[in-house]
Image (cartoon, rainbow, N blue to C red):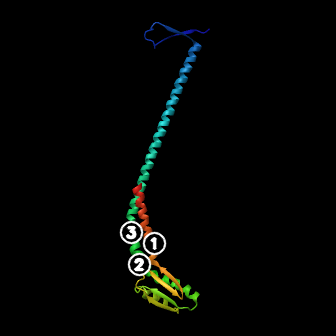
Amino acid sequence: MGSRFQLEVFELPDVTGEKVDCSAADFEEMRLAAFEKGYTAGWDDAVAAQDAESSKLRTDLAKNLEELGFTYHEARHHVLSAMQPLLRDMVAKVLPAIARESLARVVLETVMPLAEEMSGAAITVVVNPINRPAVEELLTAGKSLPLTFVEEPSLGEGQVYLRMGEAESRIDLDGVIAAIGDAVAGFFAMQNEVKDDG
């Protein structure tokens, strides 16, 4: 048998003179158990610290992403707010000017295939009096088309009707501009609703 050690007991202050006898094998077993217990406690502390750090990083990342998303939406709103008057002015001023300038060409591009199709049938061009000179000049310049021009003050400046017998064709650049204006207004109305809801 191995030698026995006597250990002093510290937990019991009232039992000061008693000693515990322990063999070397028992001592080694207790030492290994204490080491294992300390190792496990240290491992658990490290895992808990790692989990706490990961949780903090996830929270910080979520917060930063939320702030970034808010910043993006705010910047987008400011850009769209700045663009709104520009787009409305383009629809109200630029597009009608472009339509006035291009109306005669659009009418010509529409009349030529019709004139070929109808092979000599008379075509009546119904146009706003303001646009008649430009449309008539372009349609008659160097062409021998059977055209009759009728002024109609109730038509918009971007509207022309082409009549060939019973058939009628309509060019409505005013309608196109109005549809673009409605689309722009609808887009900004939707953006304002999204901002109010968000």
Where does the image place residue 150, in percent across and percent down from the top left? Answer: 45, 89
Where does the image place residue 86, in percent across and percent down from the top left? Answer: 38, 68
Which numbered disc, 1 or 2, marks the residue that appears first in the sequence?
A: 2
Q: In this view, does 53 lie above or below 79?
A: above
Q: Which amino acid, by three-letter code, is at mark 3?
A: Leu
| Residue drawn where x is 58% and y is 17% of the image | 29
Is 164 left, or right, of 196 in this rendering?
right
Q: Which amino acid, by three-letter code, is at mark 1?
A: Ala
Dot 3 and dot 1 residues touching (CB under 8 Å): no
Residue reaching furthest to the right: 1
In the foreground, 61 or 130: 130
Q: Name the residue under label 2.
A: 97
Quarter where residue 116 is shown = bottom right
Q: Name the residue under label 1.
A: 179
| Residue drawn where x is 45% and y is 76% of the image | 175
In front of the other: label 3 or label 1?
A: 1
In the foreground, 91 or 168: 168
Mark 1 vs mark 2, CA separation in Å: 16 Å
Which numbered disc, 3 or 1, marks the residue that appears first in the sequence?
A: 3
Q: Mark 3 points at which residue?
A: 86
| Residue drawn where x is 56% and y is 9% of the image | 4
Quarter where residue 92 is shown = bottom left
| Residue drawn where x is 53% and y is 21% of the image | 34
Which numbered disc, 3 or 2, marks the residue that appears first in the sequence?
A: 3
